[in-house]
Image (spheres, helix red, strand yellow):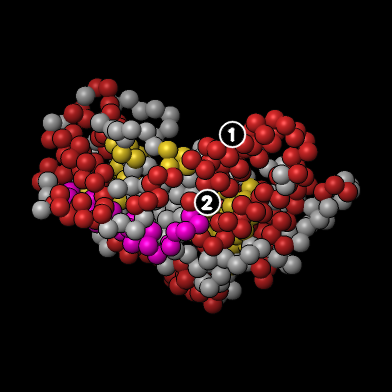
Amino acid sequence: MMINKIQRLDANDPLAHKRKEFILPNDTIYLDGNSLGALTYASAERLKTVVHHQWGQDLIGGWNCHDWIGLPQRTGEKIAPLLGAERGQVVVCDSVSVNLYKVLITALNMRPDRGKVLSEQGNFPTDLYMAQGIQALLGEDRCQLLSVPSDHLEQALDDDIAVLMLTHINFRSGRIHDMQRLTQLAHDKGILVVWDLAHSAGAVPLELDKWEVDFAVGCGYKYLNGGPGAPAFIYAAHRHHSKVSQPLSGWMGHANPFAFSDDYQAAQGIKQFLTGTPSILALAALDAALIVFDDVDMQQLRDKSIKLAELFLELKNEHPTLNELTLASPADSQDRGSQLSFSHPHAHAICQALIDAGVIPDFRAPDIVRFGFTPLYLRYAEIGQAIERLNEIMKDKRYLNAKYQQKKTVT
Ligand SMILES: *Cc1c(COP(=O)(O)O)cnc(C)c1O
């Protein structure tokens, strides 16, 4: 019965044809595209071209003849539709952490009479760390980080808060915030919002313009498949462009970098959020990877993401041994992003044993095994196989083997 159902799901999958745009190792079921997206043929080809033909042949001329200098904005324009953003509001540069620093200080500067940044406990560490660093730099009068439990956020929105800084989809649980509602509630109190979209961009439909988001940042190497350490993006709403100043005032954000003037004068528009010289190889890989989204309807992608996770849960429930793994994500698919997390005292070892069995999830301290679902390159049949292998590992307790107890630097 179940096998028929899985075959039917794959046969009727409107995104099935996307898989051939990715280079994936044989005999591997990749459930970690939420940490590092898979390689696209487009990126592999583009890198070859940029290295051999552009850099190799055109040398410094590439900045003009291949418009390398315009790439941060061009790539930003490819990401914009995935965010529900009109043109001119997204630029690609730096890392999420550095971009958070830029937009957080920018937003604080727009609320000089307030000094608090509201966030939530259990937010992604770098978000909290960056705010803590800004607090140490500016002093508590100008920046004081308040982290409250997620269900206290709404009542904590007070008129002494300058900025609400949240991650849309929680990295540990996958819980999804109602971005439109929280943005509206924050605005009602005169609070600006900064959203971290690391687990959202390329995974769920977004409407940043419609929801009147002020600033957002997001990741290039997760669901956008830009490659390890791919540059991140910044979204800044049009209405703020003429009123802001960002703190990392490097020459790439200057109105006229090649005038080499001694004094900083910010560029107009989204370009003012740039800082230094972009890494063209890294940007080119991300720019090419975004081509796979050209013909993708984000609602269709979201539907498949939910179906993949629902199938995972349904199959898991057929195996009593798997009851040991406790769901740590919201049970309702509408309330979570493109992942399922489970807690187990041996989560790390289970993860290692699964990787050995050809299924790649990841581990998040202290006790979470995280399965990411990437609708562009996963088949329903792979969910079935992943559950079978997980069941074997749990049944024979293979994960207790000493070789699975050793933690590596990156989990
Ligand atoms: C992955 C991730 C980041 C990554 O930040 P970098 O500075 O690019 O390393 C930031 N925030 C969240 C919520 C993430 O999941």
Q: Amino acid at mark 1?
A: Lys
Q: Is residue 240 above or below residue 301?
A: below
Q: What stretch of residues is rendered in magenta?
A: 293-316
Query: Of residues 69 and 137, which is closer to you in this image?
Result: 69
Q: Position of residue 126 (x, y in %)?
A: 52, 46
Q: Position of residue 339 (x, y in %)?
A: 34, 51
Q: How many callouts does the rendering have?
A: 2
Question: Nearer the N terminus, badge 2 or badge 1?
Answer: 1
Q: Amino acid at mark 2?
A: Ile
Considering every residue shown, the one lying at the far bottom of the view is 188
Tell me, yes or no, whether the highlighted magenta stretch contains residue 55: no
Query: Of residues 375 and 263, which is closer to you in this image?
Result: 375
Left or right of 255 in this view: 50: left
Q: Is residue 222 above or below residue 155?
A: above
Q: Position of residue 114 (x, y in %)?
A: 63, 66
Judging by the rendered image, the residue that carries numbered circle 2 is: 291
Image quarter of the C terminus = top left
Query: Of residues 206 and 395, which is closer to you in this image?
Result: 206
- Kind of element beneath mark 2: helix
Disc 2 to disc 1, C-alpha distance: 16 Å
Q: Position of residue 222 (x, y in %)?
A: 46, 46
Left or right of 303 in this view: 293: right
**Marker disc for residue 48:** 1
Query: Of residues 138 and 231, which is closer to you in this image?
Result: 231
